[in-house]
Structure formats: structure tokens, C-alpha cells
Amino acid sequence: MQGNLSAWLVKHALIHRSLGFDYQGIETLQIKPGDWHSIAVILYVYGYNYLRSQCAYDVAPGGLLASVYHLTRIEYGVDQPEEVCIKVFAPRKDPRIPSVFWVWKSVDFQERESYDMLGISYDNHPRLKRILMPESWIGWPLRKDYIAPNFYEIQDAH
């Protein structure tokens, strides 16, 4: 089933894949990493001027990594703003997705957290470095194939 935004993207020959609607009726679209930055700019100009959140997850052990963007179209005098969920999948071996920091500045810490926890590299992000884990940390803790290093809790150190 195709939503309003998907129909608009098709009308303007913008490549995407409709993933249907979530339980709240929010349209979900898949965008290829190579197309994401240009489509993000188009969505911003189209009116999706508010990035509610960005997160990432590991789809399956050894499988793809996903970066998820929740966008809202806020217009004056509209009681129910239009929302859309964008999913950008990247290969585990070299997960690279264009950063949308220059479109929505609020994505700064969120893309950094996705990098820190899953190792997704956001191209052209101005400060892409670890935000939660120490710089010396090895690996990506939220990947399903992550093996925790041997360490002792503080209470076990005595």
C-alpha cells in the first residue's frame, strides 16, 4: 500500500521503496544510502522541517544495519502534522550513510550515538567520534555479533 509521500516521490521519479505503515499509521520508506542525502534535502524543502529522532539497529546477526529517521512536516494551523519514517540500510562490512547534519542540525548527537554503538559511519558529519564509550573502546556494543571484552565490575575488583 502506497502512502501520500510515496506517491509524491514516484510522481517526481525519486527512487525509494514503500515499507507500508506502522501501528500508528505512519508511512515507512526505504531509501538507498547513495540517494539519502539528496532525498533528505528534497523532503526538507517539501516541508519535513523537523527531525523528531534518529536511531539505528542491527537487523540480524551478520546482516544489514539500519539507520532510522522520524520526520515531521509542521505547518502553521495544522492540527495533525504529517509524519514519515525513513529507513536507510547499510552493509555490515562497511556501513556508510551520508550524514544529514547539514539538513537537520538536531541529528548531531543521534548520528554520533549510532556510530558509537553500531559502527555506522555518517559521511560528512562534522564531529563523528564516540559519544558514550571511551575513545579506546574496541568494537560496536549494540551489534548482535558483538562479544564483550573481559572486564571486572568495580565491586569484583577487591
Image: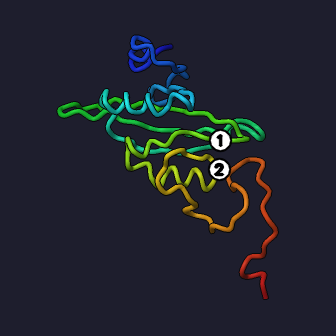
Instruction: Name the quarter where the C terminus is drawn.
Output: bottom right
Q: Position of residue 53 (x, y in %)?
A: 44, 45
Which residue position is annotated with label 1?
Answer: 95
Q: Quadrant of residue 41?
A: top left
- Which numbered mark, 2 or 1, is in the foreground of this view? 1
| Pointer 2 with pointer 1, Cβ within 8 A | yes
Horizontally, residue 69 falls left or right of residue 117, namely left
Query: Residue at the spot x=29%, y=31% of the render?
Result: 80
Q: CA distance from mark 2 to mark 1?
A: 9 Å
Q: Quadrant of residue 95?
A: top right
Q: Amino acid at mark 2?
A: Leu
- For residue 35, which numbered disc appears in the image? none
Q: Amino acid at mark 1?
A: Pro
Query: Residue at the spot x=57%, y=63% of the render?
Result: 132
Q: Position of residue 88 (x, y in %)?
A: 56, 33
Q: Position of residue 140 (x, y in %)?
A: 69, 54
Is 34 situated above or below 111? Answer: above
Number of residues whose C-alpha sits closer than 10 Å to that of mark 1, classed few (under 14), some (14–19) or many (20 or more): some
Q: Position of residue 126 (x, y in %)?
A: 46, 53
- Secondary structure under the numbered disc 1 in the rendered image: loop
Query: Residue at the spot x=80%, y=56% of the render?
Result: 147
Horizontally, residue 118 falls left or right of residue 85, namely right
Is 145 situated above or below 4? Answer: below
Q: As drawn, which residue projects farthest toward the bottom? A: 158
Number of residues whose C-alpha sits closer than 10 Å to that of mark 2, classed few (under 14), some (14–19) or many (20 or more): many
Q: Earlier in the sequence, mark 2 or mark 1?
A: 1
Which residue position is annotated with label 2?
Answer: 118
Is 127 situated above or below 4? Answer: below
Residue 67 vs residue 152, the one in the foreground: 67
- Secondary structure under the numbered disc 2 in the rendered image: helix
